[in-house]
Image (spheres, coloured by chain):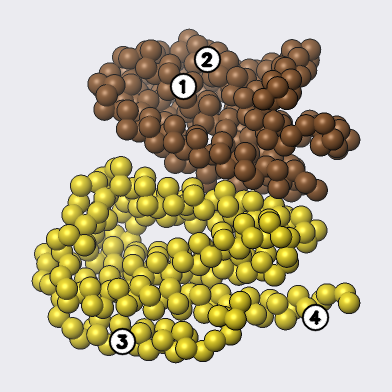
Chain colours: A yellow, B brown
Amino acid sequence: MKFIYQTWWKVLAVVMIFYTLIAGLLLGVPRLEILHETIRNTYFHVPMWIAMFTVFTISVIYSIKYLQTGKEEYDLISVECVNTGMFFFVVGLITGMLWAKYTWGEYWSNDPKQNSAAIAFLLYCAYGVLRNSIDEEQKRGKISAIYNIFAFPVMVVLIMVLPRLTDSLHPGNGGNPAFGKLDMDNRMRVVLYPAFIAWALMGVWIATLRYRIRLIEFKKNAIN
Amino acid sequence: MGQTFELLKKEIVLEWRSKYAFNGILLYIVSTVFVCYISFNLNPGFKGSQGYPIVWNILFWIIMLFASVNAIAKSFLQESKSRLLYYYCIAHPQAIILSKTIYNTLLMGLLSILAFIVYSLFFTNSVNDLLFYFVIVLLGSTSFSTVFTMISAIASKAGNNGTLMAILSFPVIIPVILLLIKVSKAAMDGIDRGLSLGNIGVLLAINVIVIASSLILFPFLWRD
């Protein structure tokens, strides 16, 4: 747990995000039909989902740990990771919708991946409702941990597996060429991969801050 | 394994004595189908229209969805607190969740066959590949049972209200029902069975994942 109190990776995250902001807007990109300059949104849209997956994965790991040990701190970590993940979920949806407006013509074009993402969003909203419906702390921690573990694979199936089975406007789905294969060149990879790491670290940072605030509250309310 | 069998026998005997769940849900299905029949007949000429097979298929699955939510939501509700304590002393948690899942699968299988017959009586059946459609109906009822049994266990721990059951289960069931509608439409149109095998494989995989995760997670949920 020492990791969350260290400074070096937070500095790294900030530096890398500034790098992707500057390099992402200045470096050259391949000229493609329809996409044109909007291809730069790849640097901002996709890393949001990477950050979301990172914090949701951490959340599931701590849910499992909570079930094994029953330590209240683990429950707080997993909850705050889900909350942070929800934030990135919303930002990912919004960046995607803006991008869709300029390339596909509409904010919401009934794309399977968009629909799946919306369903997965409902799945995690249900997690919030479930948590609020139980008053007793330990019971709440346990049941929401179980639901969290149950929901995670469903979310992965929804976002990663199902859209690939049908026709989707997203690249890499339904026979569309994936970004990695055709459209992207090394100039983009130089920016995109650091952006993945940077935003994942950013997500973890936000989650740890929220966790530390919750931990202070928890200790304040605890009966000694 | 022996415990699972005994518990399954107990569930069936209990149901056989009262026939409450079975008759209740059957009546629910018949009245829903009848309401739909009357409402659709208010619009003459709909039967011959082009969208009729699509509506036929989707309506059937929606009716099955709501019938199974209602049927399975009861599976943990009817157990009193003292009886649960008694099980806790004598049986494995895995045996309990497994027996409930198998029982619900059997119940829903039987009910969905009857529902299919009743539905075909009222709405003219235009299925080309009847045997395959039948298999999909059985597969669908199995998927509903496995998912809803676990969700109803979670909902029963969280105050047992119907709203919670619905909001927890619907996001989880949406991918399943999408696949079911797609596969059953293929069976209706009489498309070659081999083409649907991939989707059926995904459905079976979802079932296996759900059963495995409920076997792993139920022991934690169970301890109070």
At mark 2, the secondary structure is helix
Q: Mark 2 points at which residue?
A: B113
Q: Mark 3 points at which residue?
A: A19
**Type of amino acid under label 1:** Val
Residue at figure coordinates x 40%, y 67% from the top left = A50
Please report whichever mark, 4 or 3, sits nearer to the chain's N-terminal start. 3
Question: Which is closer to the viewer, label 2 or label 4?
Answer: 4
The span from disc 3 to disc 1 (Cα, nearest Å) is 54 Å
Residue at figure coordinates x 53%, y 25% from the top left = B141
Q: In this view, does B10 lie to the left or right of B171?
A: right
Q: Residues within 10 Å of mark 3 (few under 14, many from 20)?
A: some
**To which chain does the residue with label 3 belong?**
A
Q: Mark 1 points at which residue?
A: B137
**To which chain does the residue with label 1 belong?**
B
Instruction: Note whether A120 is above or below B161 in the view shown.
Output: below
At mark 1, the secondary structure is helix
Instruction: Note whether A153 is above or below A42 in the view shown.
Output: above
Q: In which quarter of the image is the N terminus of chain B?
A: top right
Q: Name the residue under label 4.
A: A220
**To which chain does the residue with label 2 belong?**
B
The span from disc 2 to disc 1 (Cα, nearest Å) is 8 Å
Q: Is residue A210 left or right of residue A87?
A: right
